[in-house]
Amino acid sequence: MKENQINFSEVDNCPVRNILDRFGDKWSTLVILILGSYDTLRFNELQKMIGTVSQKMLAVTLKKLETDGLVSRKVYPQVPPKVEYSLTALGLSLLPKLESLVQWANENRTIITENRSLKG
């Protein structure tokens, strides 16, 4: 292996796998894309826009994204509590990359679907 080459086989020590696994799950990419479109949303608004995510899974996803510094959580001291979510500067820097991936997926979805039907 070359000196500066990444060892992808070490799951815990591979920076690429470690980071991509965190936002490459079923919900994180959607959360980032939606927050990128709406700037700031409350939990229930975000859940309604996604539609099929449970409260628990959305809470876990938002917590992971917050821990990684991609999403900001702002709590207002009122009753009932008001909590808003938005992308941080780091999350905003990821947004164009995800949008490019979405564009690629849209451009190639027909051929991918055809390939799947041939192989499946």
Image (tube, rainbow, N blue to C red):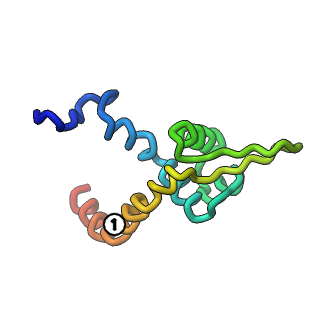
Label 1 SS: helix
Q: Residue at x 43, y 62 (%)?
A: 96
**Drawn side of residue 91 relative to residue 107, left or right:** right
Which quarter of the figure is the N terminus placed in? top left
Q: Nearer the viewer, residue 119 or 19?
A: 19
Q: x and y percent of residue 7 in the render?
A: 21, 33
Q: Residue at x 18, y 37 (%)?
A: 4
Which quarter of the figure is the C terminus placed in? bottom left
Q: x and y percent of residue 105 in the render?
A: 35, 65
Q: Is residue 104 above or below residue 92?
A: below
> Alpha-carbon neighbours of circle 1 within 10 Å: few (<14), some, or many (≥20)?
few
**Drawn side of residue 31 relative to residue 2, left or right:** right
Counting labels gives 1
Picture quadrant of residue 15 = top left
**Drawn side of residue 47 relative to residue 75, left or right:** left
Residue type indicated by callout 1? Trp
Q: Residue at x 51, y 56 (%)?
A: 92
**Drawn side of residue 13 relative to residue 50, left or right:** left
Q: Is residue 39 above or below residue 63?
A: below
Question: Can you identify the residue that label 1 sits on?
Answer: 104
Q: Residue furthest left?
A: 1
Q: x and y percent of residue 39 in the render?
A: 62, 61
Q: x and y percent of residue 84 in the render?
A: 71, 50
